[in-house]
């Protein structure tokens, strides 16, 4: 087993946190704000995460959603790498069927060269968007075929990352650069290290595949809470030790928003829920303000959706959020909690991470 790879994956809990805490950033854009504003907030949150002992900071690939400016994870991660020094940076995730595996190997090899030893490559098999947009991305309308081919695409990507296609393979003489081939070239001094690969999922498919391959697994609890425990159980039952891990390691994405008072938390999560109502009914837009959400006339069906959605958002004061996170970790046995704060304003999101860090007594900058 590669001890350094396992160390990068596992992380360390700080303060009174039961497990390592991390951040998932959707680069949300609120009404009246710009993508530039959202990306500046991402830099601020990444710096806070680094200074307060959060283990990693991931961004997620989405497309054709006005309120989510994270369509190009590799570009955003390069930007964050230039503004941080220690926090792990990664994708949560790159949707592999949208891309050629060689392109992803090249992008993340480049990121690894920019931020050596602190890049994660999280991979998903969903499109991260609606069917029509997925068809435009993939230049095909055979979308199920892309998802079904995911294990083969993953195997190809791993071969490019490790530069180890066997003799006789049509890609044997093709190399992802930056990458290991530079270490074996005459005069080569390139590090052979590559980003750890994670599998992401919201059901059992990727859980089983991650377990079988001995890879770390990230589950999307924040939008598929009913499947969390079954998927984690399946991952652990399927796990086979690998060169990467000798035991399973699973994180879960969690919607969590802490504010200075409980009433404000309710206002903020209502606005985020309205954004989800619009997305799920084919009307994606910018994240509305709390005032707009309070004035909105929800239908009975929409009210039912909001109640169900917000039941899985841990929100309130810092102490309430800490208690909710502790309970969730005990219930799921997650090895790491990756927090995503969805709110209209970047200042609210930044304050949430600060409050949670304080509640757990995470390190403070010198």
Image (tube, rainbow, N blue to C red):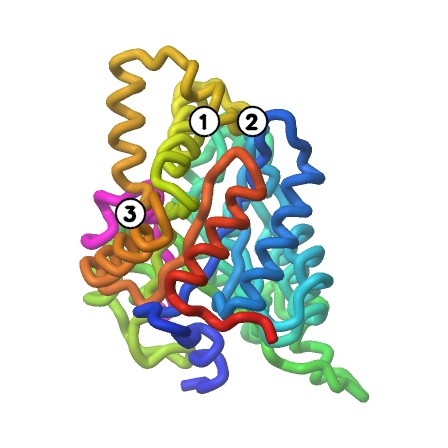
Label 1 – label 3 distance at C-alpha: 24 Å
- Residue 132 pos. (x, y %): 52, 25
Q: Quadrant of residue 64?
A: top right
Earlier sequence position, callout 1 versus callout 3: 3
Q: Residue drawn at (68%, 33%), measured in percent from left and top? A: 34
Q: Foreground: 184 or 3?
A: 3
Q: Is residue 339 left or right of residue 62?
A: left
Total residue callouts: 3
Q: Residue furthest right?
A: 187
Q: Position of residue 108 (x, y in %)?
A: 63, 62
Tell me the residue at 25%/51% (across/down): 228
Quickly name the residue at label 2.
286
At mark 2, the secondary structure is loop
Marking on residue 47: none
Residue ID for mark 1: 275
Q: Which residues are magenta?
A: 212-230
Residue that appears at 27% across and 53% down: 324
User: x and y percent of residue 111 in the render?
Assistant: 67, 64
- Whichever of callouts 2 and 1 sits on the residue coming sooner in the sequence is 1
Marks 2 and 1 sit apart, C-alpha to C-alpha, by 7 Å
* Disc 2 and disc 1 in contact, CB within 8 angstroms: yes
């Amino acid at each position: 087993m590669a001890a350094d790879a396992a160390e990068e994956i596992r992380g360390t809990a700080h303060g009174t946190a039961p497990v390592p805490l991390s951040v998932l950033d959707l680069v949300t854009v609120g009404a009246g704000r710009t993508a530039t504003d959202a990306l500046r907030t991402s830099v601020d949150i990444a710096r806070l995460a680094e200074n307060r002992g959060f283990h990693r900071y991931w961004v997620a690939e989405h497309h054709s959603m006005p309120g989510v400016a994270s369509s190009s994870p590799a570009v955003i991660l390069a930007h964050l790498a230039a503004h941080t020094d220690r926090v792990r940076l990664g994708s949560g995730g790159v949707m592999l069927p949208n891309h050629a595996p060689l392109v992803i190997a090249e992008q993340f090899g480049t990121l690894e060269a920019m931020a050596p030893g602190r890049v994660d490559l999280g991979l998903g098999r969903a499109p991260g968007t609606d069917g029509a947009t997925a068809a435009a991305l993939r230049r095909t309308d055979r979308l199920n075929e892309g998802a079904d081919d995911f294990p083969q695409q993953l195997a190809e990507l791993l071969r490019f990352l490790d530069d180890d296609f066997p003799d006789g393979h049509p890609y044997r003489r093709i190399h992802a650069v930056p990458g290991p081939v530079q270490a074996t070239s005459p005069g080569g001094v390139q590090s052979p290290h590559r980003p750890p690969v994670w599998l992401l999922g919201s059901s059992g498919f990727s859980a089983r595949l991650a377990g079988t391959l001995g890879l770390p697994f990230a589950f999307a609890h924040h939008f598929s809470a009913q499947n969390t425990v079954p998927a984690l159980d399946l991952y652990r039952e399927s796990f086979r030790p690998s060169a990467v891990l000798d035991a399973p390691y699973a994180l879960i994405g969690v919607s969590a928003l802490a504010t200075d008072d409980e009433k404000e938390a309710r206002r903020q999560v209502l606005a985020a829920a309205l954004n989800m109502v619009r997305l799920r009914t084919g009307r994606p837009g910018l994240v509305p303000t709390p005032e707009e959400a309070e004035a909105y006339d929800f239908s009975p069906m929409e009210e039912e959706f909001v109640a169900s959605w917000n039941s899985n958002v841990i929100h309130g004061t810092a102490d309430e959020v800490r208690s909710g996170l502790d309970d969730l970790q005990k219930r799921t046995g997650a090895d790491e909690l990756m927090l995503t704060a969805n709110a209209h304003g970047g200042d609210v999101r930044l304050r949430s991470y600060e409050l949670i860090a304080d509640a757990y007594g995470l390190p403070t900058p010198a």
